[in-house]
């Protein structure tokens, strides 16, 4: 068996609220599986939003270096932020992977990490370490500039509007079909606004329908809006789309959802290192979501942190 999973002590960070509380119900069963597979571990439960960041920091100060998240994409994002924001050791001395028990589970799709527990243990027993890039966004939250790392996809304009609407109307987006319905439900409510972009040395101002920035490929329960994303090439995968009507979206949805967005003439795919996003003057705010979490608004500066993480993947 591979030394990475079985010859290391692991620190498990468990989000009991993930997947609508399913993780809490299944924890006893999950714990037995780790013991049966002879994995040495300690663990802690998250109790509130962003608690995983604090747990990681405390665990690293106690000497822990290997982490497994138990939850979904939100849990994954919090733990990644904990690993990259702590100041105790270089993040490249840490090792991380995810035991997926969330709703969207988009990050694992790029890495082909199995969802079923037995298959997860089988795959991870022969896993390898991958050097993984991370995206960093500096943005405004409550009129204060702050930062957030992401390892999957960031979305602005329409993507953030879908999450904003779901939160406001208390509509759960807890599976692929719920997210799909949320996307379609918002089509006739959203009004695109002018947005200023600076992409490396290019500047432009357009009425963008959606802007997606990816380290990995999947978002929204399986959409591939940045199919050219690679988690280890040192670049941000950018997709911008403008001049789109709701009917246009509906007719081209298979392309947008199935990774054939490059065949959609209104979408532009490119790779870059830095992106600055600003709402045009005298327009409503441009909001941002990362890894499925609504975080704040533009102005926002995106950059890539090359090989910032070591992750265990099949």
Image (tube, rainbow, N blue to C red):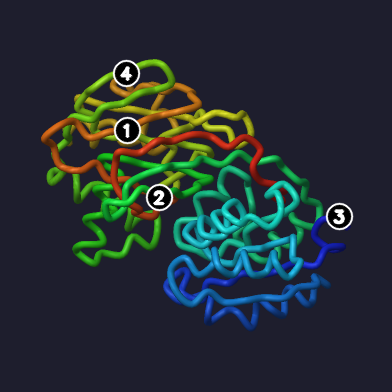
Mark 3 and mark 4 residues within 8 Å of each other at the beta carbon:
no
The label nearer to you, 3 versus 4, is: 4
Residue 146, label in figure: 2
- Nearest to viewer (mark 1 / mark 3): 1
In this rendering, the answer to whether 267 lies above or below 135 is above
Q: Position of residue 158 (x, y in %)?
A: 25, 41
Which dot, 2 or 4, sits closer to the camera? Answer: 2
* Distance between the alpha carbons at the discs numbered 1 and 4: 10 Å
* Quadrant, the N terminus: bottom right
Identify which residue is drawn at 33% across, 27% down. 240
Q: Which label's residue is closer to the chain start, 2 or 4?
A: 2
Provide the secondary structure element on which disc 2 rests: strand
Residue occupied by mark 4: 203
Residue 277 left/right relative to 309? left
N-term mark: 2 or 3:
3
Q: Depth-wise, is mark 2 or mark 3 nearer the camera?
A: 2
Position of residue 123 in the picture relative to residue 227 (left or right): right
Say which residue label 1 marks.
277
- According to the picture, the residue beneath numbered tag 3 turns out to be 2
Under circle 1, the secondary element is strand
Along the viewing direction, whichever of 1 and 78 lies nearer the viewer: 78
The local crowd at label 3, few if under 14, some if 14 to 19, many if 20 or more residues have their Cα within 10 Å, is few
């Amino acid at each position: 068996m591979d030394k990475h999973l079985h010859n290391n002590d692991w620190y498990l960070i468990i989000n009991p609220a993930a997947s609508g509380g399913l993780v809490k119900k299944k924890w006893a069963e999950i714990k037995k599986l780790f013991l049966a597979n002879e994995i040495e571990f300690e663990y802690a439960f998250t109790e509130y939003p962003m608690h995983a960041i604090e747990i990681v920091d405390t665990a690293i100060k106690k000497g822990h270096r290997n982490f497994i998240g138990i939850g979904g994409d939100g849990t994954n994002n919090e733990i990644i932020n904990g690993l990259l924001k702590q100041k105790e050791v270089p993040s490249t001395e840490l090792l991380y992977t995810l035991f997926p028990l969330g709703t969207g589970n988009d990050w694992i799709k790029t890495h082909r990490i199995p969802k079923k527990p037995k298959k997860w243990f089988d795959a991870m027993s022969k896993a390898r370490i991958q050097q993984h890039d991370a995206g960093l966004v500096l943005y405004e939250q409550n009129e204060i500039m702050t930062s957030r790392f992401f390892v999957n996809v960031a979305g602005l304009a329409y993507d953030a509007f879908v999450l904003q609407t779901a939160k406001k109307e208390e509509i759960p987006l807890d599976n692929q079909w719920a997210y799909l319905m949320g996307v379609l439900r918002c089509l006739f409510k959203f009004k695109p606004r002018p947005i200023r972009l600076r992409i490396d040395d290019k500047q432009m101002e357009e009425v963008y329908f959606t802007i997606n920035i990816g380290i990995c490929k999947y978002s929204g329960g399986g959409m591939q809006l940045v199919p050219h994303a690679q988690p280890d090439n040192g670049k941000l995968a950018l997709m911008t789309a403008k001049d789109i009507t709701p009917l246009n979206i509906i007719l081209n949805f298979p392309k947008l959802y199935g990774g054939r967005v490059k065949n959609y003439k209104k979408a532009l795919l490119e790779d870059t290192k830095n992106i600055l996003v600003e709402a045009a003057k005298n327009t409503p705010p441009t909001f941002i979501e990362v890894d499925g979490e609504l975080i704040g608004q533009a102005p926002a500066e995106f950059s890539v942190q090359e090989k910032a993480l070591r992750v265990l993947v099949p």
